Image (cartoon, rainbow, N blue to C red):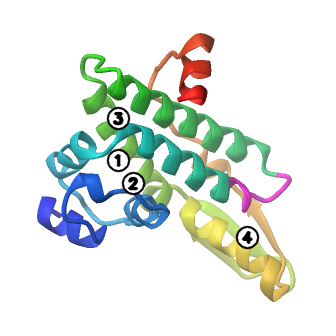
Amino acid sequence: MDREELFALLDIETGEDFQYFENFADFVENEGAIDSDAIYDLITEIDMKTFAELCESYFYETLENVPGDQIDIYSLLENIKRVLVGLSEAVRKGEENADLKLTDEWNKFRIWYSADSEVECKNTASDEVHYVPVRDALVISRMEKLDGDEYRYDFAGALDYELEEFIMNYADMAEAEND
């Protein structure tokens, strides 16, 4: 997917239009191939404060659907969020190569979250087992609350995710919170 197709998918004309929860969700929930240059173009045009807010909001919503006994995947998702928000702050400050790192990390998360990860979801009533990416397992978890089906989740196969080594000190985090 090139820049034009990516922007059409996100229903935006420029990166400045990337302002809504749906824009963030449409990107990370797309399992198709996206050209890294198109993602980089998008990153360089997005307001990074808005990106950080959308990231926080998306992960808040996502973490609400993690089954209560799945602490490891909850912690991993929380750490991924911190890295993405931290990298967006580094881009905002103009740190060298931060835009490239954010491009790579955001795309790596998208591919892992929506395509490459594998979660075992077993219906406790029928013993039917599905192997799905994290994105779909969290949808099943959300639906479980609505339709009454109960599932047992095994996220062990999805925990192999190497985080970008990014260090943000407490002063930077406090400053980001106040902005």
Query: Mark 2 or mark 3, which is nearer the start of the sequence?
Result: 3
- Is 6 within the magenta? no
Q: Give how far apart the Cα atoms at labels 2 and 1 are.
A: 6 Å
Q: Amino acid at mark 4?
A: Ser
Per the rendering, the mark at residue 111 is 2
Label 4 secondary element: helix
**Badge 2 vs badge 1, beta-carbon distance below 8 Å:** yes
Q: Callout 3: few (<14), some (14-19), or many (20+) C-alpha neighbours within 10 Å?
A: many
- Is 66 within the magenta? yes
In the image, the segment drawn in magenta is: 63-69
Query: Mark 3 or mark 4, which is nearer the start of the sequence?
Result: 3
Q: Please give the name of the residue rendered at 67% of the width and 64% of the height, measured from the top-left corner.
A: 120
Q: Position of residue 113 (x, y in %)?
A: 49, 55
Residue picked out by circle 1: 107
Q: Give how far apart the Cα atoms at labels 3 and 1 are.
A: 8 Å
Residue picked out by circle 4: 141
Q: Please give the name of the residue rendered at 48% of the width and 28% of the height, measured from the top-left corner.
A: 86
Q: Amino acid at mark 3?
A: Leu
Q: Position of residue 93 (x, y in %)?
A: 35, 21
Q: Amino acid at mark 1?
A: Asn
Label 2 secondary element: helix
Q: Callout 4: few (<14), some (14-19), or many (20+) C-alpha neighbours within 10 Å?
A: many
Quarter of the image holding residue 144?
A: bottom right
Q: Position of residue 111 (x, y in %)?
A: 39, 54
Q: Amino acid at mark 2?
A: Ile
